[in-house]
Amino acid sequence: MPELPEVETIARGIEPLVVNKTINNISVYYPKIIAGDAELFQKTFIRQKIVRVWRRAKLLIFDLAGSAHLVFHLKMTGKVWLPHRDVRPDKHTHVVFHLDDGESIFFQDMRKFGYCAFYSTKDLQLWNFFATLGPEPLEVSHDEFSRLFSSRKGRIKALLLDQKIIAGVGNIYADESLFMAGIHPETPGNRLSARELGLLYHNLKEVLVQAIDAGGSSFRDYRNALGYSGRFQESFLVYGKKGECCPRCKTILQTCKVAGRTSCVCPACQRK
DNA sequence: CGTGCGGCCTGAATGC
DNA sequence: TGCATTCAGGCCGCAC
């Protein structure tokens, strides 16, 4: 499931492949995957040059000349990539962007949870989801990070997953960073000590940077801009490892539900 | 303010 | 073998 490191990997990989190219035509196979009017969507982007590809939270954003923005949310199983020219759209291919050099960008999503949307620069800033995103974990200061959690009663795992509090963290990196920091996911934010907040701040940044360096995690479906898997899933400490031994103390790892999400914890290393 | 649940989706894994 | 159930989970809307 593409979280911050996976979307960052896609943005970095795809930008040099598409920048300064023009979208000649768009094929929409599943109009419901487009947020808004699909016909207007096609008109907005045809004959527009791509000038930049970047990430905010888990959003993949293409900036086009003329201040239009093409925005993707990949949710769990979405993929945005450039296949070889002879690859035909399959049943999970919902939108194809045909570029002026004959290459094409595929938007695929087996589960159809993802979406693509289009905004003017002004409308992007007005879009509530975008406008209310919390700070980026790799840019926020230690003090500001601590302030995000120290006044809230909610459980730290739920707070980490709340995009309005901090942006881009999903189930994998929430579990990994909490384990690294020795914090139980059910601990209320306002019960964390300054030391624990410091550990979480540094460990979250560390795991995100390491995951980006490894090209993201391909636990189930994630692929990069060229269709290749990431490697960080080989470095998971606890995610998806229920029943296995804690890498630190060898206690059997357990799961609990927090905010509706399965959370993997070491009952010895992570105390409430 | 905080929590829980259903809905959106499909495919892999599991149960009988 | 084949059918039914469960699970995966980001985000929203809603009830309490």
Image: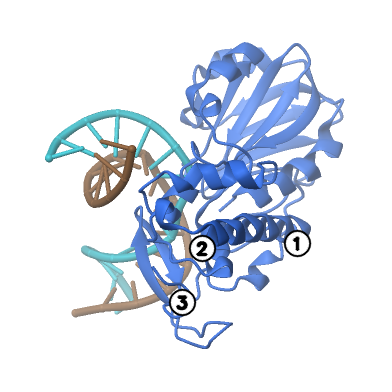
Chain colours: A blue, B brown, C cyan
Which percent across, then down, holds residue A37? 50, 16
Residue A111 can be seen in this image: no
- Mark sitting on residue A214: 1
Q: Chain of mark 1?
A: A
The residue type indicated by label 1 comes to Ala
- Residue count near mark 1 (Cα–Cα under 10 Å), binned few <14, some 14–19, many ≥20: some
Residue under the image location 82 percent in, 33 percent down: A18
Residue A266, label in figure? 3
Q: CA distance from mark 3 to mark 1?
A: 25 Å
Q: Position of residue A247 (x, y in %)?
A: 58, 82
A265 lies above or below A29: below
Q: CA distance from mark 2 to mark 1?
A: 18 Å
Q: Is residue A114 above or below residue A199?
A: above
Disc 3 secondary structure class: loop
**Up-down relation of residue A237 to residue A261 (above or below):** below
Q: Chain of mark 3?
A: A
